[in-house]
Amino acid sequence: MERTPPPELFDSHTHLNEAAFSGDLPAVLERARQQGVREMLVVGYDLPSSAYAVSLARKYGLYAAVGIQPHYAHQTGPRELARLEELARDPRVVALGEIGLDYYRDRSPRPQQRRLLGELLSLARALDLPVVIHCREAFADLLEDLGREGKGWRGVMHCFSGTVEQARDFLALGLHLSLAGPVTYPRAPKLWRVAQEVPLERLLLETDCPWLPPQPHRGERNEPAYLIYTAARVAELRQEPLEAVAQATCRNARALFRVDGRPPVSFSEEVRPVSRP
Ligand SMILES: [Zn+2]
């Protein structure tokens, strides 16, 4: 029997820069490609993980996002912001993130989280980069902070965990919404409604690996090859063909991050010397 190849998918949020992948990243990337995932965004959350995201992007032909999570707001001043800006100017960097507000873990005082968010949003505007937003239990303040600067936001609410009403508010600001493994869980009716209602042209998919594995792999390390489970569940919830969801979410990610669908060549290929006698 002939096997149809898996549809092409774009993993719009990975942490391949985590220690969990340091032992076998080439094998992880190979499995991803076999499952149709050729394009992956590696996302930083502080300066070291952002710098490493850029170097992995160069080495393996991936895309990078650089950012500072709200947890580190109390340790972030002008010097750290200047270093982040320097990293953000690398041609492999296609977004500023992750940035945002986290009132679930509350590791930095909330006013400092909002101060840092404001600074990073201004930086994203200045560099004309889309934003990758992390938000946990802080939707009202986030809406207020984004709304203050108008509606024309280019960016994505990553691993969206809000209600369908909150989803509408972020869509109205111009943002995309990204769904991850939790939409495959057996008791996630709030996320299922979001999956059903987001306009297809505003939807992205992600693994957020090594965290949040989809249902068949719960308890394991997540990886980009498992994105297909999330894609399939979203297609099922929307009653649309998997192929249509895959195509649209790839197209959306490419447009948002302004990449053309041909994964960048890796650094080793770029610098391969041409030696002729
Ligand atoms: Zn993340």
Image (cartoon, helix red, strand yellow):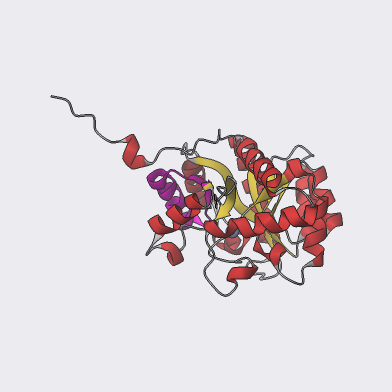
- Extreme right residue here? 165
Horizontal side, residue 228 vs residue 191: left or right: left
Q: Image point 74% across, 40% down: which residue? A: 201
Frontmost residue, 66 versus 230: 230
Q: Residue at x 43, y 63 (%)?
A: 21
Q: Write down the region rendered in magenta.
A: 38-64
Measured from the top left, where is residue 183 in percent x and y? Answer: 72, 62
| Residue at the extreme top | 277
Q: Front-most of 154 and 13?
A: 13
**Percent x, y of residue 30:** 43, 53
Q: Is residue 113 left or right of residue 269?
A: right
Whether residue 7 is in magenta: the answer is no
Residue at the extreme left:
277
Q: 31 or 84, which lies in front?
A: 31
Residue 98 x %, y %: 60, 53
Is residue 10 visible in the rendered image? The answer is yes
Total numbered circles = 0
Give the image quarter of residue 159. Answer: bottom right
Nearest to the observer: residue 98 or residue 229:
229
**Does residue 140 appear in this view?**
no
Q: Is residue 23 left or right of residue 166?
A: left
Q: Residue furthest front?
A: 1
**Is-magenta flag for residue 43?**
yes
In this rendering, is residue 130 above or below 102?
above
Question: The C terminus is located in which quarter?
Answer: top left
Residue 70 rendering spot, x and y as whole percentages:
62, 60
Q: If the picture is divided into quarters, which one holds ligand 1? A: bottom right
